[in-house]
């Protein structure tokens, strides 16, 4: 079994948007759709977004910590922490799930490349949890 | 000595010579064998002592059906010798034998067997006197039992993995393989789990047959590699499915999956499950059927087939079915001496008889083995059914028994499936009832190889169709099996008893005899579930796999009421014993998530004692200097706060951004207080109730704009509060326009508190006007502090002038450092939760979890002012009204001053009523107050407000009685002038 590479994403700008967003307002941005009215915009600041109608946009970059997990063993590593059927998350898709019991945002960038973001308060614990399982793949 | 090695190695080949020890004695076996095979090959027949009577026991079976050969090995206190793979240096010891396996003093129990039948402990050892039974019970427990748990920490390594599939196939025998292969070919995601090293071994190893044009194991290997190549399919070897739960959730335990890993738990979620779990051979009950040398016929054959081990020099077969003749013939062809076949049926099938005579084995029809001679089998006593005393002796050292086959329908039943009795096979088979599981192969009652494969393919077709796929029409291959005979048993499962015959065992693992079952029926325990618990039949580690069918047959016979075969007792997961560590593989720090604030490293570096508190947060309790105790450190921190200035980390506080046209309406419904009249730029303390009026949470919410709020909750309830907000806005009131983004970890929260707080904040540098008129109590302002964008609020939990500074979490340390530097000249101190506890008690501020104890409502806590009773509705309103109308006395918030000012009333101490015998309240929070120089406490007392000024007696958890006076719950600055400065 092969190992997975775990690399921190580092500080990033994130905007959480709650509410219906006007058609096309988020065009050209890297956006994760996490719920019917819930979006996470990567690499942007709330003040720099176009008008969003009644939706609430809040900077949440400091509230998250993320890692990129890649390699043939990444899916197996995630399967140890997460009960979601990862085969149903296709490249380009993202979802909310629980990772080691903690709410997490999982994004599949490519067939063997994933991004995991969790609440920053749990970051140290989650990273240690993942790395402890890395070798056992 | 009976076992020996045949000249020809078995299908496993003879691996490298491997030294191991058993019972402290050295042995040698071959790599690739099981411990049981190696012991048999070495002629070592005595491997265990039985559970209750400590009778000498040998190996009965080949694999998981083994009921006798439990040993301690490799940290496992109760392992089956038939499932332990030999490795160099392996050391196994027998259980339950003292001082040694060969001489076990507790075998004396066997002599007194008549005095200790089933259930003896319900009727005996009950006196004299009331202390007799506890004394005897300890001795009885010590005398029984299997295995000793090593008190040291386990050295096994485990992990758990989740997996998903369309179909889970449990068992990779011919049926499982055929089905899995076909399902994989249809493009479904399939997981095939099998407990053996190699698929197909149990049924096909050494079988003289052809499947299509292939030998059986060739066919099996081809199907297995075909399956392995299919995308999205996974085959697990050495993995037993131990539990099948609701909604297709299965647990499988994989043994030794990788170097350095002992066991891996698979949590499998399958849309459909196909059970191909096979069947195990059924024993026959006769006197002495537990002696070393009495073995399962198919096991004897498999030891010869697989490992080239002959279990004895002379085998006598005792069987009630035709298929046993085929096994006996295979055994003979492998070179093992088979003397005779004792068959209680009046007639055997023609093909069976012909086969036997061709091989020179004489069938003895209409007879049974009624007893065994020797402590280990030396001869079998055979008698006709109608005259059990007319015995003749059959020289042998192994009695190979076959009473038919018991399908392993456990997983089907665990998932809620029903089983039905098949009279021809005398067995309970799974009944297909439209649920998500199907069964195929021997566990579904198939008795031929072709039937197993055909049935499996049919089941696979149905499953595929149910999942919207088609299996390319699979042709059942031409299957030819030499000597394939019918395993349907005759009607005899218990040999007639001869005069003077000894114990005849039904459950070998639990030491339950046929006499015990008849005793249970005589005593009225005549149902399977009752008999099981009365006799403990089926309650040993093998969970009654080998004994259930015979126990049911004997029970039915003993009842003699023609009620038919009783259904087996309830099958519960796990199917086989599973180590706790495998089910809960994470240990220590990894069991619960740990949350840290952005300043965690600073707190640790400053020597703080870190506490694990609500919501799994790790927070500083106090910052001891030198050899300070907790009380000394907390007192120093309190004095700094009240006297000059202190700073604390409040980052874990729950924080939520709310927006929307209906935000005010939403918050007015969620909280018991009013929000509509709160001017933007200000905050207000709010309390949320549950539907039954109890206080759920409190916190300050700030109105940032007409339709924007920043709501804070307690740390411990932040997640629960979030869930309540989401439930109400999505489910309860979806018509309200409310937007919500949680920001608990986005903002670090640092509170500067004390009379010098304003100067220190100004010294740190800010563009916010801090003057009292510009920035009044409870207001919130935005700007910069120490160059960092910040929100600052004048909220106080300590009762001192207080500025709560919120900055983006990644700049927390920058802010903290700047505030410490700015406050150094004033003697600023960091404040921990212990000091915070003291400060808020001095002010009489309530805390969720202490005064808001899950029972109190706002009126109880003297907070009538917070309830906006004029609001049309809010969560908990009606319950509050009901509480007010209730005449029964309710607990009310009071302060307590201990009669001895130097003694701190213990938290939790009960306040007693006038009689001194009944409690009417308790101490919720208590401390030594540095500001007042004496102890103070808060508590909840029934009708407390009416009792202010009176003295009460308290009962401490230690048993001590103390006295205190009830006072108003505010010890310092009751008008709040300091925090409003």
Image (tube, grey):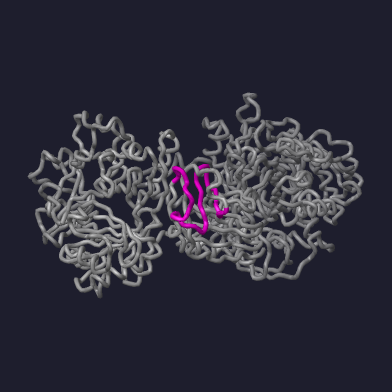
Residue at 63% x, 25% y is B563
Residue B286 in the magenta stretch? The answer is no
Above or below, B321 relative to A61: above
Task: Residue B906 in the image: state x and y as whole percent.
Answer: 20, 54
Q: Where is residue B722 drawn, in percent x and y? A: 40, 46
Return the residue found at the far bottom: B626
Left or right side of B644 for A90: right
Q: Is residue B52 visible?
A: no
Q: Say which of B92 and A67 sits in front.
A: A67
Specify whether B824 is left or right of B290: left
Name of the residue lying farthest toward the left: B949
Above or below, comparing residue B800 to residue B856 in the picture: below
- Side (left or right) of B272 relative to A12: right
Name the residue nearer the viewer: B296 or B669.
B669
**x 56%, y 50%: residue:** A27
Question: Which residue is rendered at x = 39% and y = 41% of the image?
Answer: B660
| Quadrant in which the N terminus of chain B is drawn | bottom right
- Asked if the stretch drawn in magenta spans residue A37, the answer is yes
In front here: B437 or B561? B437
Res. B93 in view: yes
Left or right side of B593 for B107: right
Q: Which residues are magenta?
A: A28-55
């Amino acid at each position: 079994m092969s190992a997975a590479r775990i690399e921190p994403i580092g500080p990033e700008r994130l905007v959480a948007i709650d509410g219906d967003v006007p058609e096309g307002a988020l065009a050209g941005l890297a956006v994760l759709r996490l719920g019917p009215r819930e979006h996470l915009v990567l690499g942007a600041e709330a003040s720099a977004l176009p008008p969003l109608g009644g939706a609430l946009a809040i900077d949440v970059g400091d509230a998250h910590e993320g890692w990129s997990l890649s390699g043939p063993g990444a899916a197996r590593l995630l399967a140890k922490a997460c009960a979601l059927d990862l085969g149903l998350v296709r490249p380009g898709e993202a979802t909310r799930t629980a990772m080691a019991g903690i709410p997490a945002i999982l994004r599949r960038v490519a067939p063997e490349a994933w991004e995991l973001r969790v609440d920053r308060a749990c970051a140290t614990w989650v990273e240690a949890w993942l790395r402890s399982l890395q070798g056992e793949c | 000595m009976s076992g020996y090695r045949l000249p020809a190695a078995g299908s496993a080949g003879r691996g490298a010579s491997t030294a191991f020890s058993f019972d402290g004695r050295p042995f040698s076996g071959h790599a690739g064998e099981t411990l049981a095979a190696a012991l048999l090959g070495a002629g070592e027949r005595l491997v265990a002592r039985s559970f209750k009577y400590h009778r000498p026991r040998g190996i009965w079976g080949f694999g998981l059906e083994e009921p006798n050969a439990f040993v301690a090995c490799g940290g496992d206190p109760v392992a089956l010798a038939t499932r332990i793979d030999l490795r160099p240096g392996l050391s196994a010891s027998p259980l339950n034998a003292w001082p040694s396996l060969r001489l076990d003093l507790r075998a004396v129990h066997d002599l007194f067997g008549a005095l200790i039948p089933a259930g003896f402990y319900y009727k005996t050892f009950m006196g004299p006197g009331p202390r007799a039974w506890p004394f005897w019970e300890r001795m009885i427990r010590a005398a029984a039992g299997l295995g000793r748990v090593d008190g040291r920490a386990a050295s096994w390594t485990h992990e758990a993995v989740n997996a998903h599939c369309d179909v889970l196939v449990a068992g990779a025998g011919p049926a499982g393989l055929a089905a899995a292969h076909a399902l994989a070919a249809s493009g479904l995601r399939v997981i095939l789990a099998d407990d053996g090293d190699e698929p197909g071994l149990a049924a096909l190893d050494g079988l003289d047959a052809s499947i299509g044009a292939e030998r059986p194991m060739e066919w099996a290997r081809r199907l297995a590699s075909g399956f392995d190549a299919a995308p999205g399919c996974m085959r697990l070897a050495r993995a037993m499915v131990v539990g099948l739960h609701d909604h297709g959730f299965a647990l499988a335990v994989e043994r030794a999956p990788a170097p350095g890993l002992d066991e891996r738990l698979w949590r499998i979620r399958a849309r459909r499950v196909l059970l191909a779990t096979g069947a195990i051979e059924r024993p026959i009950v006769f006197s002495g059927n537990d002696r070393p040398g009495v073995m399962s016929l198919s096991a004897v054959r498999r030891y010869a087939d697989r490992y080239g081990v002959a279990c004895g020099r002379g085998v006598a077969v005792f069987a009630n079915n035709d298929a046993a003749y085929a096994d006996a013939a295979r055994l003979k062809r492998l070179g093992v001496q088979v003397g005779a076949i004792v068959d209680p049926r009046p007639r055997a099938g023609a093909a069976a008889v012909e086969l036997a005579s061709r091989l020179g084995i004489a069938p003895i029809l209409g007879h049974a083995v009624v007893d065994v001679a020797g402590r280990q089998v030396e001869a079998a006593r055979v008698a006709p059914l109608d005259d059990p005393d007319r015995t003749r002796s059959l020289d042998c050292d192994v009695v190979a028994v076959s009473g038919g086959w018991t399908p392993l329908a456990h997983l089907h039943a665990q998932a809620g499936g029903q089983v039905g009795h098949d009279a021809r096979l005398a067995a309970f088979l799974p009944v297909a009832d439209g649920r998500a599981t199907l069964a195929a192969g021997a566990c579904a009652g198939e008795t031929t190889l072709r039937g197993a494969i055909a049935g499996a393919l049919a089941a696979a077709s149905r499953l595929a169709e149910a999942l919207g796929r088609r299996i390319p029409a699979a042709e059942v291959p031409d299957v030819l099996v030499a000597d394939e005979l019918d395993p349907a048993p005759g009607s005899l499962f218990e040999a007639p008893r001869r005069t003077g015959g000894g114990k005849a065992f039904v459950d070998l693992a639990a030491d339950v005899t046929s006499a015990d079952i008849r005793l249970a029926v005589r005593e009225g325990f005549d149902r399977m579930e009752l008999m099981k618990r009365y006799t403990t039949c089926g309650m040993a580690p093998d969970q009654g796999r080998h004994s259930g069918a015979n126990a049911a047959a004997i029970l039915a016979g003993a009842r003699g009421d023609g009620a038919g075969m009783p259904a087996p007792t309830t099958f519960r997961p796990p199917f086989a014993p599973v180590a706790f560590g495998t089910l809960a593989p994470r240990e220590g720090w990894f069991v619960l998530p740990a949350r840290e604030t952005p300043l965690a490293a600073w707190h640790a570096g400053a020597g703080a004692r870190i506490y694990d508190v609500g919501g799994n947060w790790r927070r500083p309790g106090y910052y001891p200097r030198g050899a300070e105790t907790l009380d000394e450190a907390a007192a120093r921190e309190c004095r700094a706060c009240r006297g000059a200035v202190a700073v604390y980390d409040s980052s874990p506080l729950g924080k939520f951004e709310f927006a929307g046209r209906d935000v005010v309406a939403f918050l007015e419904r969620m909280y018991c207080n009013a929000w509509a009249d709160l001017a933007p730029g200000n905050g207000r303390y709010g309390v949320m109730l549950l539907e039954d009026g109890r206080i759920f949470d409190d916190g300050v919410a700030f109105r940032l704009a007409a339709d924007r709020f920043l709501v804070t909750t307690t740390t411990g309830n932040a997640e629960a509060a979030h869930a309540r907000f989401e439930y109400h806005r999505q489910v309860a009131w979806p018509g309200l326009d409310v937007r919500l983004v949680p920001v608990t970890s986005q903002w670090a929260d640092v509170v500067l508190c004390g009379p010098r707080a304003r100067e220190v904040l100004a010294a740190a540098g800010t563009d916010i006007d801090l003057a009292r008129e510009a920035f009044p109590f409870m207001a919130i302002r935005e700007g910069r502090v120490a160059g960092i964008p910040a929100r600052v609020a004048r909220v106080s939990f300590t009762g001192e002038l207080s500025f709560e500074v919120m900055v983006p979490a990644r700049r927390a340390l920058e802010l903290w450092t700047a505030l410490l530097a700015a406050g150094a000249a004033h003697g600023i101190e960091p404040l921990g939760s212990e000091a915070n506890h003291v400060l808020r008690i001095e002010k009489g501020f309530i805390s969720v979890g202490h005064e808001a104890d899950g029972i109190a409502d706002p009126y109880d806590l003297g907070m009538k002012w917070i309830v906006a009773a004029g609001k049309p509705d809010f969560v908990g309103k009606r319950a509050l009204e009901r509480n007010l109308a209730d005449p029964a006395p309710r607990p009310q918030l009071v302060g307590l001053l201990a009669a001895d000012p130097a003694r701190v009333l213990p938290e939790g101490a009960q306040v007693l009523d006038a009689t001194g015998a009944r409690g009417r309240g308790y101490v919720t929070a208590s401390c030594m107050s540095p500001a007042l120089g004496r102890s103070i406490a808060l508590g909840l007392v029934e009708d407390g407000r009416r009792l202010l000024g009176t003295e009460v007696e308290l009962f401490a958890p230690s048993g001590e009685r103390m006295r205190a006076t009830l006072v108003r719950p505010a010890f310092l600055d009751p008008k709040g002038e300091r925090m409003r400065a």
